[in-house]
């Protein structure tokens, strides 16, 4: 099922109401779903490889703790933050300043990822520091996606609440 952007994210506690959560595609909802955003976001950093390593390790630790508690929504949110660490660090590696698309995000698409009809800006020469930070997050993201408990809990969640 697609991610539901019509929910009142300011009031929904997804730990109490996991039935409202949808995995969606990629990083959908990563900066909306509480209380997980508040628990994970303070640890999310990718400035350089040292900072990225510390950040990815802490977030992966949260991922494992959520799995151990059978909190799939938390685990999936941690997985999304690892993915976002990779994609944002790669964006900064490819585009100095991190701006990938020309022009503003259309008002009806704010909070959603994508080009939304905007052209991609030319790439800068690759920033090796950001590329190294991205590789750290990519390895942790891959490990999270392949984790047998994550795969099992995701299948159970989708069987119970929908894909």
Image: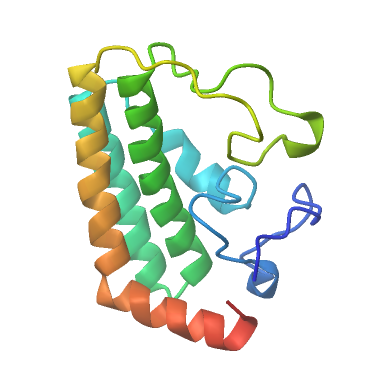
Number of dots carrying numbers: 0
**Residue 63 picture location, percent across and down:** 36, 59
For residue 6, side relative to residue 147 (left or right): right
Q: Is residue 42 above or below residue 60?
A: above
Looking at the rendered image, the quarter that the N terminus falls into is bottom right
Q: Quadrant of residue 138?
A: top left
Q: Is residue 48 above or below residue 2?
A: above
Q: Is residue 35 above or below residue 151?
A: above
Residue occupying the point 59% across, 17% down: 102
Q: Quadrant of residue 137?
A: top left
Residue occupying the point 48% across, 56% down: 77
Q: Is residue 155 above or below residue 84?
A: below
For residue 83, side relative to residue 60 (left or right): right
Residue occupying the point 34% across, 47% down: 59
Q: Nearer the viewer, residue 131 or 43?
A: 131
Q: Nearer the viewer, residue 103 or 3?
A: 103
**Residue 96 picture location, percent across and down:** 38, 11
**Residue 76 picture location, percent across and down:** 46, 62
**Residue 54 picture location, percent across and down:** 24, 35
Residue occupying the point 39% across, 27% down: 91
For residue 153, side relative to residue 101 (left or right): left
């Amino acid at each position: 099922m697609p991610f539901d952007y019509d929910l009142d994210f300011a009031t929904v506690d997804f730990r109490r109401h996991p039935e409202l959560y949808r995995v969606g595609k990629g990083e959908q909802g990563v900066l909306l779903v509480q209380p997980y955003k508040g628990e994970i976001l303070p640890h999310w950093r990718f400035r350089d490889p040292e900072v990225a390593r510390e950040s990815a390790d802490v977030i992966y630790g949260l991922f494992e703790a959520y799995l151990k508690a059978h909190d799939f929504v938390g685990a999936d949110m941690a997985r999304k933050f690892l993915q976002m660490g990779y994609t944002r660090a790669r964006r900064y590696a490819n585009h100095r300043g991190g701006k990938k698309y020309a022009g503003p995000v259309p008002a009806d698409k704010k909070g959603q990822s994508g080009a939304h009809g905007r052209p991609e800006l030319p790439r800068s020469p690759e920033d090796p520091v950001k590329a190294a930070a991205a590789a750290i997050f990519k390895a942790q993201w891959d490990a999270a996606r392949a984790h047998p408990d994550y795969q099992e809990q995701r299948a159970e969640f989708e069987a119970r609440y929908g894909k």
